[in-house]
Image (spheres, rainbow, N blue to C red):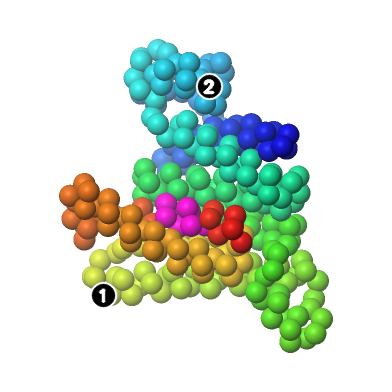
């Protein structure tokens, strides 16, 4: 229980940092310098006005200086990241597997909101995430990997779990991005317009490195989620579905977190 509470507080801090990334990376700005400032008036934000969740509450959701509203995404990203970290700690305890899940979930939250707001998936999350995911496959090997199970079945005795995990992560990244690229190509051929961006292709490669072959399940769930929610939203807002650009990365990210949690 105490682990989950600590993880929640840590997740709030990471969520606060993610908010900076979500705003700055799609705009090619540094996340290190300058310090946090109000996106409306540019006034630097003091540390006591930058406490996750609490500051939003005691400032009444408004900037102290210009009184313009603070976007709802700020407290939401902090809360969601905190909760995901708590769930990870509760499920895996203080272990490499928990750390791996937290890293993955944090980057997914970053991509979910980047895509929703800007229709962009920053390379820092996708390409950077792919490298981190492959390293994580070695440090915290995939449990019940499909490729590993098959290799063991054929040879009777498989290579080391770390080697198998790394192999599966690389294979899953290649298969996921290859099939996503194929879908994008087909979509462009059939509808004569670009429907999926290359960002999605890089995003599923990153997901494959973390999830192994279960990434295919996440892609499938993301497609269903995107179709149902996207069509529903377009109908509700009375937008033309053919011209409405779906934040597909947002749905992929939600599905990816679900698959990582449920296994
Ligand atoms: Zn302001």
Q: Main secondary structure of the magenta part?
A: helix
Residue 127 position in % (x across, y down):
54, 56
Q: Residue furthest top?
A: 65
Residue 165 position in % (x across, y down):
71, 67
Element on which disc 1 rests: helix
Q: Given contact means CB atoms under 8 Å apart, are the residues at marks 2 and 1 in contact?
A: no
Say which residue appears at 39% left-offset and 59% top-offset. Answer: 225
The dot on residue 3 is none
Crowd class of label 2 (few under 14; some 14 to 19; many from 20; radius 10 Å):
few
Say which residue appears at 46% left-offset and 40% top-offset. Answer: 22
Say which residue appears at 70% left-offset and 64% top-offset. Answer: 143
Q: Nearer the viewer, residue 246 or 41?
A: 246
Q: Quadrant of residue 148?
A: bottom right
Position of 227 with respect to 27 (left or right) is: left
Front label number (2 vs 1): 2
Residue 206 position in % (x across, y down):
55, 59
Mark yes or no: residue 14 visible: no
Q: Which residue is mark 1?
A: 190
Q: Magenta segment, which residues?
A: 249-256
Element on which disc 2 rests: helix
The dot on residue 54 is 2
């Amino acid at each position: 229980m105490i682990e989950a509470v600590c993880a929640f507080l840590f997740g709030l801090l990471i969520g606060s940092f993610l908010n900076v990334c979500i705003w700055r990376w799609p705009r090619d700005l540094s996340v290190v310098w300058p310090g946090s400032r109000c996106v409306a008036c540019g006034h630097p934000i003091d540390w006591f006005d930058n406490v996750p969740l609490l500051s939003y509450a005691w400032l009444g959701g408004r900037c102290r200086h210009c009184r313009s509203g603070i976007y709802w995404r700020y407290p939401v990203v902090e809360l969601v990241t905190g909760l995901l970290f708590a769930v990870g700690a509760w499920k895996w305890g203080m272990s490499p597997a928990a750390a791996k899940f937290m890293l993955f979930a944090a980057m997914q939250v970053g991509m979910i909101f980047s895509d929703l707001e800007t229709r962009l998936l920053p390379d820092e999350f996708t390409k950077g995430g792919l490298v981190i995911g492959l390293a994580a496959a070695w440090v915290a090997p995939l449990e019940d990997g499909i490729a590993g199970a098959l290799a063991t079945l054929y040879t009777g005795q498989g290579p080391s779990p770390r080697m198998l995990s790394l192999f599966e992560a690389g294979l899953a990244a290649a298969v996921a991005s290859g099939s996503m690229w194929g879908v994008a190509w087909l979509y462009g051929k059939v509808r004569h317009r670009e429907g999926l961006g290359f960002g999605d292709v890089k995003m599923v490669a990153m997901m494959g490195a973390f999830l192994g072959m279960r990434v295919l399940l996440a892609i499938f769930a993301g497609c269903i989620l995107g179709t149902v929610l996207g069509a529903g939203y377009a109908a509700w807002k009375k937008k033309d579905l053919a011209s409405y650009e779906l934040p597909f990365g947002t749905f992929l990210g939600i599905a990816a977190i679900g698959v990582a949690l449920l296994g």
